[in-house]
């Protein structure tokens, strides 16, 4: 089989169809990730577009040209919608529908009403270039690694495709009148289809890589965080302590620990229901995250009890922060089904300056201080050093 224009059309159509099946299957197993269905449909439409183009072995079937352009435009638009959905951004359906309508209109005009292959190809190339530039712009952004590799690979592929469409528009427009045709032996046609074949492969591979990184991040998040509150879980707390321990020993810093517990939590569940209790716990974490520093580490220790690791923090500084957290929680009741649910918290504080750099000893001391706060009336902060 010679590598001519028709061969590359078949290759693009088959590749796009296979990518559509691959992405469709992936969407069934990654239901929490948006954008896969749009990309699956995009690949299907691109496959249909090139399949229709292949049927145009001889000039004359104008409506086949229109159908091919519509499928390709819809495929490009769906790729951009898929990117927006993947990034959890508002989908610009109206704008992209207008773009597809523009392609349909100008293709009908230059194919059926006033046939002009050169102007039709130029106008459509400009639209496709704009769509691919928009996709490239959405992906070539500042983002943390390793996601950046997948984003930039896909975005660079879109940018290359956009440049190719732009050069195609310039080449066709500058060619002598009536000299351009899809199957004319002009270098731009085989070059463009070859670029499309290779670039489409990279596009789909890059998007699948983006999905893979997203799934890996979600799995890691499930393994390290509490699903209800979004705080770190107990296992993550123990792992984080090891790094904070090394830091404290290296820099001769004090490490403090805070244990927090919602007062009369069972009463809240009994009076308002367990969902209201869950909302109280979520609100506690929201309040805490507004008060703690970037390097502090907040984890759910068990039930309604939470632990906060405070690097480079003395017991006195930890007490001050604990008091702010206590007041913050008291001043922000939860609104649940038309009712304001008020609650208080008790906090115990311990520091390595009195206990030493041992996780079990620090947690035990902070828990002892928390228990004293509960014994002496609740809704208060108690430091372990004050009860020795």
Image (spheres, helix red, strand yellow):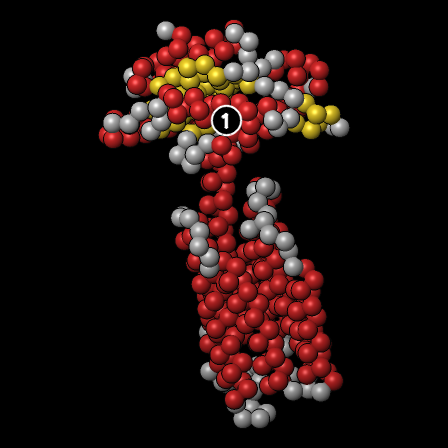
Q: Which residue is mark 1?
A: 324
The local secondary structure at tag 1 comes to helix
The residue at the point 46 percent across, 40 percent down is: 216
Q: Residues within 10 Å of mark 1 (few under 14, many from 20)?
A: some
Relative horizontal placement of residue 357, taking residue 125 as reference (left or right): left
The residue at the point 45 percent across, 14 percent down is: 382
Relative horizontal placement of residue 138, taking residue 361 as reference (left or right): right
Q: Quadrant of residue 10?
A: bottom right
The residue at the point 69 percent across, 68 percent down is: 98
Q: In front here: 183 or 267?
A: 267
The residue at the point 31 percent across, 15 percent down is: 354
Q: In front here: 112 or 301?
A: 301
Q: Is residue 303 visible?
A: no
Q: Position of residue 100 (x, y in %)?
A: 67, 68
Q: Is residue 6 visible?
A: yes
Relative horizontal placement of residue 126, taking residue 237 as reference (left or right): right
Relative horizontal placement of residue 358, taking residue 95 as reference (left or right): left
Image: 302 above or below 206: above
Q: Quadrant of residue 362?
A: top left
Figure disc tally: 1
**On-image quarter of the C terminus:** top left
Q: Position of residue 163 (x, y in %)?
A: 48, 73
Image: 6 above or below 360: below
Q: Position of residue 14 (x, y in %)?
A: 55, 62
Q: Position of residue 106 (x, y in %)?
A: 68, 78
Image: 41 above or below 286: below
Q: In front here: 34 or 284?
A: 284
């Amino acid at each position: 089989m010679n590598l001519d224009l028709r061969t590359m059309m078949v290759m693009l159509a088959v590749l796009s169809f296979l990518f559509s099946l691959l992405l469709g299957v992936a969407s069934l197993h990654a239901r929490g990730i948006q954008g896969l269905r749009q990309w699956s449909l995009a690949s299907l439409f691109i496959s249909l577009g090139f399949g229709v183009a292949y049927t145009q072995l001889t000039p004359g079937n104008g409506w086949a040209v229109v159908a091919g352009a519509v499928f390709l435009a819809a495929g490009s638009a769906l790729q951009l919608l898929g990117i927006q959905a993947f990034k959890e951004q508002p989908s610009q359906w109206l704008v992209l529908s207008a773009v597809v309508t523009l392609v349909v209109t100008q293709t009908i005009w230059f194919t059926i009403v006033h046939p002009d292959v050169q102007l039709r190809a130029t106008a459509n190339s400009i639209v496709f270039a704009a769509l691919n530039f928009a996709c490239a712009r959405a992906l070539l952004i500042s983002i943390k690694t390793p996601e950046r590799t997948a984003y930039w690979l896909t975005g660079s592929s879109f940018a290359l495709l956009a440049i190719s469409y732009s050069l195609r528009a310039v080449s066709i427009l500058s060619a002598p009148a009536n000299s351009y045709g899809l199957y004319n032996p002009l270098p731009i046609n085989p070059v463009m289809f070859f670029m499309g074949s290779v670039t489409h492969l990279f596009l789909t591979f890059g998007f699948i890589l983006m999905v893979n990184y997203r799934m890996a991040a979600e799995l890691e998040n499930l393994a390290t965080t509490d699903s209800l509150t979004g705080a770190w879980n107990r296992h993550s707390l123990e792992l984080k302590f090891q790094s904070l321990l090394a830091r404290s020993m290296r820099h001769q810093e004090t490490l403090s620990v805070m244990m927090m517990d919602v007062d009369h939590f069972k009463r809240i569940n009994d009076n308002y229901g367990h969902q209201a209790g869950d909302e109280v716990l979520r609100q506690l974490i929201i309040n805490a995250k507004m008060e703690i520093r970037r390097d502090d580490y907040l984890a759910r220790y068990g039930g309604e009890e939470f632990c906060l690791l405070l690097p480079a923090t003395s017991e006195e500084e930890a007490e001050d922060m604990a008091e702010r957290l206590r007041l913050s929680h008291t001043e922000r009741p939860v609104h649940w089904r038309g009712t304001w649910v008020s609650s208080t918290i008790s906090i115990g504080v311990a520091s390595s300056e009195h206990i030493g750099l041992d996780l079990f000893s620090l947690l035990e001391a902070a828990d002892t201080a928390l228990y004293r706060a509960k014994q002496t009336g609740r809704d208060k902060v108690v430091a372990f050093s004050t009860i020795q």
